[in-house]
Amino acid sequence: MSESKTTSGFGAWVTATRTARNLTLKELAARAEINARTLREIETEKRPNPSLATREKLQLALERADKASSDGGLGELETAPTASEAYGEWLLGERSKRNLTRQALAAKAGMNERTLGEVERGKRHGSPATRKKLELALGVSPPLAVQKVVKEETTIQGVGEFSDFDPHDLDELPNGPGVYVFYDISDRPVYVGESGNIRGRIRGSHLEKFWYRRPIVEKGSYVRVDNDRLRRQLEDTLIKFLKSNAVINRRQVAK
């Protein structure tokens, strides 16, 4: 989400940002799922201290409107949210209901605040371990519809679930056999690897490499694969499929 705005001047910021996104007041109210009258009072500073939940709904709605605009309007054609978006919306709503700050929830879940922000913004749905931490901290599980879309989007048929992880959070590194992919800051895949112990491989072979730093390696995803032969086949297939996009593999930088 964009940087948090203080209550002072929040209404003016909303007005300016809404105008820049070519949204009417009613359109933004509908996107943020708040009353149009409430939004009008916020923009005119008649309601200078909106609730945390309302502020975050408006910020998220404006951020997504900006993304749709930068995509040439294509985002408006998408009727169904991705797994990341669905989970992020649910998470933000549950945190807002409890009037928890992002910092407070991150601390309660024992995770990085930056990671939580990315999950809420729909940039990643988080690994199963991350989602479990958040759900335990909130004391609630997502609705079945959200669970279904996450499972469908993160499962490779005949192999298993494809999950996100933060490659710079050592506690979140996958602990088991599988194939993994690193992405740069623009979500471009830059490296594909396989190992019988992904956590051990990353700690032993990658952490000290110059290319492992942000923004070259920003995110990671992996699928658990126990069979050695299948892991190697899947790794080779992904490298060939990604071609020159997997720049670290292409340059043969210390696999």
Image: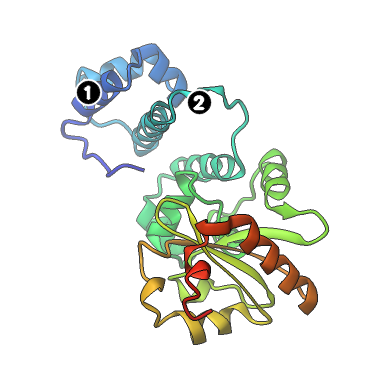
Determine whether the residue tagged by mark 2 lies in a helix, strand or loop: helix
Choose the circle earlier in sequence order: 1 or 2: 1
Depth check: 144 or 209 in front? Answer: 209
Image position, residue 156 (x, y; %): 75, 55
Image position, residue 7 (x, y; %): 21, 35
In the image, is residue 105 above or below residue 65? below
Quadrant position of residue 185? bottom left
The residue beneath circle 1 is 16
Image position, residue 197 (x, y; %): 64, 82
Quadrant position of residue 49? top left
Residue type for callout 1: Ala
Whether label 1 touches label 2, CB < 8 Å: no
Residue drawn at the location 27% of the way across and 22% of the way down: 20
Number of residues whose C-alpha sits closer than 10 Å to that of mark 2, classed few (under 14), some (14–19) or many (20 or more): few
The residue beneath circle 2 is 74
Quarter holding the N terminus is top left
Image position, residue 191 (x, y; %): 52, 66
Residue drawn at the location 35% of the way across and 34% of the way down: 59
Residue 227 seen from this side: no
Q: Residue furthest left?
A: 8
Determine whether the residue tagged by mark 1 lies in a helix, strand or loop: helix
